[in-house]
Amino acid sequence: DILCRYMRAAAGLGLLRMSPTDGRAARALDCRFGLTQSGHLVRADIPGSMRAFVLYINEESKSAYRSAGTSSLFSGRSGFEEAFGEEHFSWHVRHGDRQSQFDAAMTSLTPLHVNPLLGDWSPPTTNATICDIGGGQGHLLAKVLHRYPSAHGLVMDQPSVVNRSTAYLASEGLDSRASALGGSFLASLPRELAACDVFILKLILHDWNDPEVVTILRHIAEVARPGARLDIVDRLLGEGTRPERRDGWVMDLHMHANHAARERTLVEFQDVFRIAGILAEVRTVKLRSIVWLLQVTL
């Protein structure tokens, strides 16, 4: 009976579909359900599954949201730190199962942004060296290199991710054109990144507050050769359609809850560029997605 009631509630959310008789039935034995299109997205065995993202949002993030609406209002710290005693990324490094789930959650979002990016973006040259900073296992880089077969690439992320990145790039047949580096963009970057023609930061800067963003930008500018390009894929608060603006304001609170960070307006992006010493004009391109492309020459 209880399972049937939960399934009926899921049907009310659009995840399950009841047979016509089930709507009148009170007994659990009469409850038969099928998955809707939305319900199929939380399966683990289908392409495009959002299961890992749903689990992430409803596990540790749930506690972060609760604390963000209470303790964080007074402390200014992230809801995640209030709930777990340390910040999001360091906590996940120490909890391997949740780190794997977080990686999978971020990977599940990749097609939402990568496909529009590939439609509206191109490297400086077809044989460019493309560097994805904070690029996880390298899914974006792999898509780009398949699109531009003369290009080479590097993906940099935490040292704990490098082995998985290397294995993934090899599984994509890209081990001769791509490699993974371990490092932190909050510290001096590996000198290998001096070879980059373009640096990509996809949904990275909204994970950090302004002082950390300035540090990240300065470290990229320090290692980059003159004339290299910095391409940032992120939301622009207050821009786009009304639903996009609404979702951006909600996501701004999500970033505070999990990272003590924020989404930004174009003016706020220009401010952190200026403080970091990057004074070139910022070019913006609205992607066919909820995010924008911001480009600046270093």
Image (tube, helix red, strand yellow):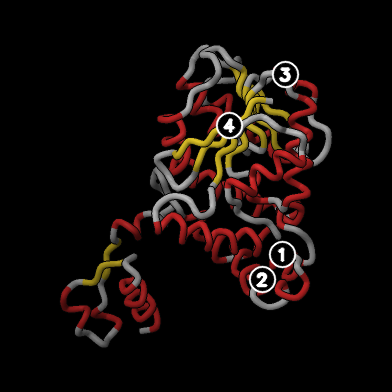
**Tag of residue 226:** 3
Residue ranking furthest to the right = 188
Q: Which residue is mark 1?
A: 78
CA gap, disc 3 to disc 1? 36 Å
Q: Nearer the viewer, residue 82 or 181?
A: 82
Q: Mark 2 or 3, which is nearer the eye?
A: 3
CA gap, disc 4 to disc 2? 32 Å
- Examine the rendered structure and indicate whether residue 35 appears above or below residue 222: below
Position of 16 compared to 221: left or right? left
- Examine the rendered structure and indicate whether residue 95 appears above or below residue 19: above
> Circle 2 sits in a helix, a strand or a loop, which is it?
helix
Q: Within 10 angstroms of label 4, few (less than 14), some, or many (20 or more) residues? A: many
> Circle 1 sits in a helix, a strand or a loop, which is it?
loop
Of pointers 4 and 2, the one earlier in the residue sequence: 2
Residue 284 visible somewhere in the drawing = yes
Q: Amino acid at mark 3?
A: Pro
Residue ranking furthest to the bottom = 26
Cβ atoms at labels 1 and 2 below 8 Å apart: yes
Percent coordinates x, y for residue 213 in the rendering: 73, 45
Of pointers 3 and 1, the one earlier in the residue sequence: 1
Cβ atoms at labels 3 and 1 below 8 Å apart: no
Cβ atoms at labels 4 and 2 below 8 Å apart: no
CA gap, disc 1 to disc 4? 29 Å
Q: Mark 3 or 1, which is nearer the eye?
A: 3
Q: Which residue is mark 2?
A: 68
Q: Which residue is mark 4?
A: 295
Percent coordinates x, y for residue 81 in the rendering: 75, 65
> Circle 3 sits in a helix, a strand or a loop, which is it?
loop
